Image (cartoon, grey):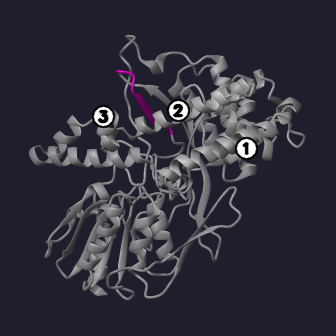
Amino acid sequence: MDYIAQLGPAVLDHRFRRITESLLRSAEEIYQARQLPFRARWASTYTLLYNEGPLAIGQIAERLRLTHPGVIGITNDMMAADIISAVGDRGDARRRLVDLTPRGREMSTELFAVWKALGDAQRKRFDAAGCDIMAVLATVDEALVEQPLAGEVLAKLAARSTKRRQASKTRRAVRAMSAFLFAASLASISAGKASAQGTGESVAAQPVSADARARVVNALSDSLINGYIYEEMGRKAADALRAELRSGTYDAFTSGDALATRINETLKRVANDRHLGVQYLRPAAGGTPVRRRMIPGGPPSADDSGRRIVRAPTDSAPQPASQSRPRAISAVVSAPEYGFASAQVLEGNIGYVEISGFSGDPAAIALTDSIMALFANTKAIIIDLGRNRGGGPPVIQRLSSYFFDKPVHLVSSFMRGMEKPSERWTSDVPGKRLPNTPVYVLTSRSTISAAESFTFGLRNHRRITVVGEPTAGGGHFGNFIPLTDGFSVFLPRGRTYNPVTNEGWETDGLQPDVPVQYEKALETALALAGKA
């Protein structure tokens, strides 16, 4: 019996790797038998260049969802085989492009014939197994991009560990024992702070060479030009970075962390984007990668597409407004692993829920319905987002839908490369709608990204009263783009906005209807609800 098959989904990556290696070996054998000087891993790059070339390395990485260094490796090998070559961009001398050589294009007839025969044979195998493999892969692939697994799993593990620790120790002891508390929604990126001990010195202290600095700046510049939400601003930032590289501005920054921090100063000065930022990925003790987020102009955050950046809690994090809440008259619902810190009905028949993050787990939708059933007959509802760092759209859409009795266009989002914006509308809900129940949303200066998006969509329709502090101003969304030499960039690729006014909240944040310190926001909202 196949030992790996016995282990089930826990080693699914191993099963996929075995299948991939088998498919690659078959392709290599076919190329060799047909005397084609071609490698299996070049096929997607070749096809993209054949149909759309010439393209920049960053564009290839973006379209194929590969890393920048990975595409460099593939294209270097293809250049050595005289299948592609470097060409200039007639419209912009700053861009470095690659395209098929005449020899490469001559191979197209034979290559496409091989790929059709190979594809037919592969599909036949999967059809025999009762699987429409292309449809399945499309669904799974998009789902993993929208909601990567790492953050979701880490959140559940962290929540389980937190519950065990809280059962026996005080909150202060928990913070002392736990170096970092991971939390995630739809998402995927862990943050940390550690040093490697294997060589007897910190990896961060090891110097970044001049060549590495140049590679990082050039890769970042390509990513900004090809993918940043505002193309003109992306080019402006790229020009500033390359000018500083030429002038020697970065020569003194020989550690990865220091270089990332200095680059982010320029990004902040030029673009002033709360989400745009470079980070340095370095191994911790034992060789495990640790991601350090170097966000310009503020703390890290999450984005409205569901990709989350997790940060460690600090003593300066806003304290929950719920500390001063009155006595609960219902059972308290607490499911931090799904983003709901607590939910209860308070004295005065006022529903209160603190949402620490908008989870992408399907169970979070069911939990949303349960909480709204608890609030079905309350006098008012208070939604505490003071410590919410973001998440994804599903819970936002579901929760928002309870507050209207007809379809409502909440917000629109546009991402560079899209032909038309996507729209977020209210949806059907299984429970009682509450279109006339007063709703108060509590905010702090740490409320950011998807938490702002939720608040923004409801306030566009004058459905809520915002109580607290101005929010952080993270109105863009995007994803991490690997650069080179251990660096990556969180690249904003889209924005969420009011479809009527075309205005968003990036940088400026959302101003409260009732300004008050976050610590007093709940008390203030309760007083307002009592008068409603």
The secondary element bearing badge 2 is classed as helix
The secondary element bearing badge 1 is classed as helix
- Residue 37 spot, x, y in % from top left: 75, 25
If the image is split into quadrants, where does the C terminus sit? bottom left
Q: Which residue is mark 3?
A: 1
**Along the polypeptide, which appears first: circle 1 or circle 3?**
3
Question: Residue at position x 36%, y 60% from top?
Answer: 386
- Residue 58 spot, x, y in % from top left: 69, 39
The secondary element bearing badge 3 is classed as loop
Residue 248 in which image quadrant? top right
Q: Which residue is mark 1?
A: 225
Q: Is residue 302 above or below residue 4?
A: below
Q: Is residue 218 magenta?
A: no
Could you tell me the amino acid type at mark 1?
Answer: Ile
Q: Is residue 173 above or below residue 485?
A: below
In this picture, residue 389 sits left or right of residue 206: left
Between 385 and 495, the one nearer to me in the picture? 495
Name the mark nearer the viewer: 2 or 3: 3
Q: Which residue is mark 2?
A: 22
Badge 1, how many Cα within 10 Å: few under 14, some, many 20+?
A: many
Could you tell me the amino acid type at mark 3?
Answer: Met
Name the mark nearer the viewer: 1 or 3: 3
Look at the image and give the residue range highlighted in magenta. 286-294
Question: Residue at position x 79%, y 42% from top?
Answer: 50
Q: How many marks?
A: 3
Badge 2, how many Cα within 10 Å: few under 14, some, many 20+?
A: few
**Along the polypeptide, which appears first: circle 2 or circle 1?**
2
Could you tell me the amino acid type at mark 2?
Answer: Ser
- Residue 318 spot, x, y in % from top left: 33, 53
Between 117 and 225, the one nearer to me in the picture? 117
Query: In 3D space, how far apart are the residues under numbered discs 2 and 1 (Cα atoms)?
Result: 38 Å
